[in-house]
Amino acid sequence: MVKSYVTSAFVQALGSEVFAVFGWSQRQTYPIIAKSWLATLEIFICEHNLEAAYQKFQVIQSTPISQSITTAVLPYKQPLTESKELLVFLGKQKLTILGNGFKSYIDQENTLELNSFSQTSPQVLLELFAQQKLEDDLSQIDSFNSFKLLVESLEKIGLISPEVGALNWGDFRKTNPICHVTGFTRGTPIDRYYLQKFVSKIKDQVVGNVLEVGGVAKDREFYQFDLASTYRIMNLESGSGIDLVGDVHDVSLIETESLDGVVIFNVLEHCYSPWIAVENIYKWLKPGGKCFCMVPNAQRLHDRPGDYWRPLPDGVNWLFRNFSQRQLSIYGNPLTVIASFHGVATEELTSEELDEFHADYPVSTCIVATK
């Protein structure tokens, strides 16, 4: 079955270059490097069938840009180059210049719709960005297969998506998770994979007199925190290997400025006042001492004893704002967010899929904060 697609992108000229920009996003702009990219993005505004889209691409290859298109876009070519506000929105049946950037997309003011010209001949973008430096590669897309590969690469970047109704939900079209315990019944949970990546970065820094909050007896060996001279475990409940029974909200449990390091993995979400927990850790640490923290961002509720928060990267940075140094490590992407919520196991994804990072879709946020 041939897939059907629709364009979903915002495009902007910045000087002599063209970029895809992502609204309300922490994702960086992405360079549009070739004329074939612009032509393909414009085709899928109105044409969604892959084979029919290639036929239109072949017409573009052999047809000069019409005078009507040249005339229509002429007033906007120079402003697009000079203004950081002007954007071009590409969506289903939409090729719209947004005079006030993303604000125009919301309030629909100061916009110009050019789709009527595009429907006749999808070469508006090629003319609109004719002053920018783009690889002239239209003739290199010389087969249906090379066009299909181009479309797939644009889909991977996130500029083209399956048309509405063309998604294949497969095993994910269900209202209960694939695994009810975050992936443990299938293998290694996604967040455990990211935790191990974080641990491998920090284990040489976990030294001296160390306290782990919310841990269990085997953690030191499991994480290979071998450089700690002492390693104590604090937990709410007593048990084998628990050195201190208590609540991290209680500052009196630990002597002020007595610790070289505090490890607190997947605990702050269970603290009713995580800001108090972090303030106490700050007091317990010696000057120069470090806190090593991880919190989940995309994980099902797990109320042991309660599940109050999902601190996001900005929130984590704020919680540790009084520390002199803060180094965030953020992991995740849309695929691993979905996988984490569904309880898909690490072993069911490739390392490339797990390690790909998208700033808007964190699964886990970690921080090394130095007092």
Image (spheres, helix red, strand yellow):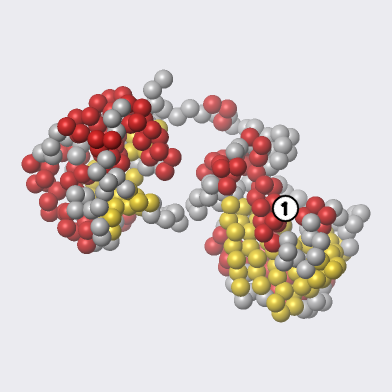
Is residue 41 visible in this depiction of the protein? yes
Q: Is residue 59 above or below residue 319?
A: above
- The total number of labels drawn is 1
Which residue appears at 8% of the width and 41% of the height?
A: 68
Q: Is residue 56 above or below residue 239?
A: above
Which residue appears at 72% of the width and 37% of the height?
A: 187
Q: Is residue 94 above or below residue 311?
A: above
Quarter of the image with the C terminus is bottom right
Across and down, in percent, residue 260 comes to 77, 73
In this rendering, position of residue 170 left or right of residue 236: left
Q: Is residue 277 above or below residue 1?
A: below
Closest to the observer, 165 or 303: 165
Furthest-top residue in view? Answer: 1
Furthest-right residue in view? Answer: 240
Across and down, in percent, residue 316 comes to 60, 63
In this rendering, position of residue 360 left or right of residue 119: right
Q: Quadrant of residue 43?
A: top left
Say which residue label 1 marks. 306
Closest to the observer, 30 or 175: 30
Across and down, in percent, residue 101 comes to 29, 56
In this rendering, position of residue 99 left or right of residue 176: left
Is residue 89 visible in this depiction of the protein? no
Q: Quadrant of residue 125?
A: top left
State the SS at label 1: loop
Quarter of the image with the N terminus is top left
Which residue appears at 60% of the width and 59% of the height?
A: 329
Q: Quadrant of residue 254?
A: bottom right
Judge the density around disc 1: few (<14), some (14-19), many (≥20) Cα neighbours within 10 Å. Answer: few
The disc labelled 1 sits on which kind of residue? Gly
Across and down, in percent, residue 304 comes to 76, 50
Which residue appears at 40% of the width and 38% of the height?
A: 153
